[in-house]
Image (tube, coloured by chain):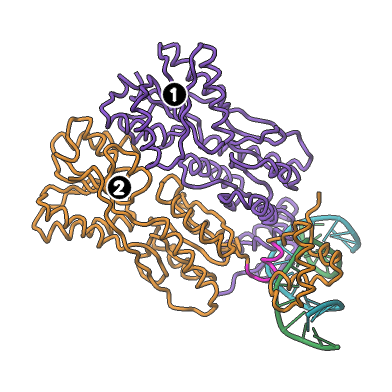
Chain colours: A purple, B orange, C cyan, D green
Amino acid sequence: MNQIKIYDIAGSAGVSLATVSRVLNHPEKVKKVTREKVLRIIKEKGYKPNANARGLASRKSTTIAIVVPTLTRASISEMIQGIENSAKKFGYTIRLFVNDDLENEQETWREVVASSVDGILFMCDEMSDSIYELIAFTPVPVVFVNAQSKNQTFGSVGIDNEKCAYDITKQMIEKGNKKITFITTKHTYTVNETKVKGYEKAMHEADLEPEILESVGVIEENEAQYREYLKDHRPDVVLGARDSMAISFMNVAVKLGIKVPDELQVIGFQNTRYAQLSNPKLTCIDTPIYEIGNLAMVKLTGLMKENVDIKPTNTVIDYQIIWRDSTK
Amino acid sequence: MNQIKIYDIAGSAGVSLATVSRVLNHPEKVKKVTREKVLRIIKEKGYKPNANARGLASRKSTTIAIVVPTLTRASISEMIQGIENSAKKFGYTIRLFVNDDLENEQETWREVVASSVDGILFMCDEMSDSIYELIAFTPVPVVFVNAQSKNQTFGSVGIDNEKCAYDITKQMIEKGNKKITFITTKHTYTVNETKVKGYEKAMHEADLEPEILESVGVIEENEAQYREYLKDHRPDVVLGARDSMAISFMNVAVKLGIKVPDELQVIGFQNTRYAQLSNPKLTCIDTPIYEIGNLAMVKLTGLMKENVDIKPTNTVIDYQIIWRDSTK
DNA sequence: CTGAAAGCGCTTACAG
DNA sequence: CTGAAAGCGCTTACAG
């Protein structure tokens, strides 16, 4: 079965293909009677314009690219879901790129650009500096989603990670806790680095010694590391840069007979679905991930409409703390 | 900055654009000297052919579509990751469609087809019958990934859910358990329906009464339901069609003072990342989700190469049981 | 082995 | 308000 083309619709409707095209793209330019007739036939035949041809001719593809570092993190999936939801409303389709090979960042980026998208949502938080120059020369708008470049030349949507780590640390200090450990990732993700910064700031202000534990991010290895750590450390509070790390730590502690939250309080940083499946349920900084994705798409849509180079802005989303059972 | 076109490369290399195109698509047809010169310039300029133009001219887009019902389920994300990994190797790019609006299935499908992809990976397991007819008329190959149509006319990759539910149920019966409850989803996903079938078969064979609990899939509501259920039920074993449901049930039970695994054993059906973050760690049927995604892409690539209509095959992947701490 | 030319299925100034 | 025509950036028979 051959796909229906615009010529077929034009033929059936007794108009030129230019008119069919106009019905689709500038309906107000077509007389009502004609328009309705064409629309009826389009519906009857289930016609959908070929995306490639449309993209080539109009130089717009109504497609955006999402570039993610991986799909295994729950936070990323939830963000994509938020983006998709918003994209659908605006009529955009999504191309998905997973940038898990840091050797080929540049190559990947070129591919993203060549894929003829109208805009790019960039969610990678561990990139080498050189990539940012390449990104700066991208002919379509780019929005950083819950990620940041070291120099602030790109538009972004995210939360203020430093402030949020600072706030929660300070709160826990004010509640009388002194030994507060921060678990972060071994790899340096800008996002997590920023959290560490906020944590350290709060600790220093209170004249407390920051205690940072770097994990690989692989569950089995993390657990062994935490078990080792608990042999000669007894933190009052553990903050995990990711929920999964916080939960792993909590599970290890509970198994060692440490009472959560009485003897140890644990807090996560993302409020993914994991947080509600842990036992006890994890207290979290709730970074409204779905909403971030949603708003990022709204922002990108704005940039794609304005052909002018409007100054990129950084949207900071509010976060909140969800107190659950892993804290007193 | 304007994107580099094939003309620019042809100009710089002193050849026609046909030659540049050949270097990219049929390198063996170009003299070595010419080829290398062109390749060098392509690299220097960072040229990537425009995907729309290429797709339009060649009627191949080296893009595939993935159609998923949602992104919030860990199993789906992991599958996409598997697909992406494989797709990258074959040089395919991904278009992502989320088909969460059952009202508009047909509309969505038309959009998928019009998006000019070379093949489609279909991962939705809750569709109305009418959609299958539409899918049958798709001009490009479609592979069902861990999903099935009621009539078996499409190629697929997945596991034998019925057998796997049957096997685990039987094993637990042989170990002396009698009160085995199966938690499934309220919505009828073909996949989960099949699991129920296998479970029921094993129970009937052993002259035991099947006990099925249908959950909504929303954590809070599930928990309330499980708490209620445990008031007057004390199963020996609970099988959860999804890990998240198994874990929720386990958490509720533990909170009520029921000892896992001594008084209650819990088994999940997917072995997602959740399983290792639960406490105790969840025993699971390990459906090798990543691998399923991977193989599905391999199969699709095969179908896209052969232009002939080869008979669609159903690939059944082996599963195994990962015994962890939620069972004796 | 290479180039000139047609064509992929659309969109959009340009006339009328 | 509508149609004829050029053009988007490629690929691929067809000649040579």
| Residue type of the residue flagged with mark 2 | Lys
Residue B147, placed above or below residue A229:
below
> Mark 1 and mark 2: span between their CA atoms?
42 Å
Q: Residue A43 location in percent, x, y? A: 58, 61
Image quarter in which the C terminus of chain B is found: top left
Which secondary structure, mark 2? Answer: loop
Task: Give the residue at mark 2.
Answer: B186
Q: Nearer the viewer, residue A162 or B151?
A: A162
Q: Residue at x 22, y 44 (%)?
A: B266
For the question of whether residue B183 can be seen, the reply is yes
Q: Position of residue B51 (x, y in %)?
A: 68, 61
From the image, tell me which residue sits under label 1: A181
Q: Please, what is the three-letter code of the amino acid marked with disc 1?
A: Thr
Dot 1 and dot 2 within a common chain: no
Residue B101 on image: x %, y %: 46, 50
Residue A15, by quadrant, is: bottom right
In this rendered view, identify the residue nearer to me: B214 or C2: C2
Residue B57 belongs to magenta span:
yes
Residue C8 is left or right of residue A167, and the answer is: right
Compared to B327, does A3 lie above or below?
Answer: below
Instruction: Tell me which segment is drawn in magenta.
Output: B52-60
Residue A104 falls left or right of residue B309: right
- Label 1 or label 2, whichever lies nearer to me, is 1
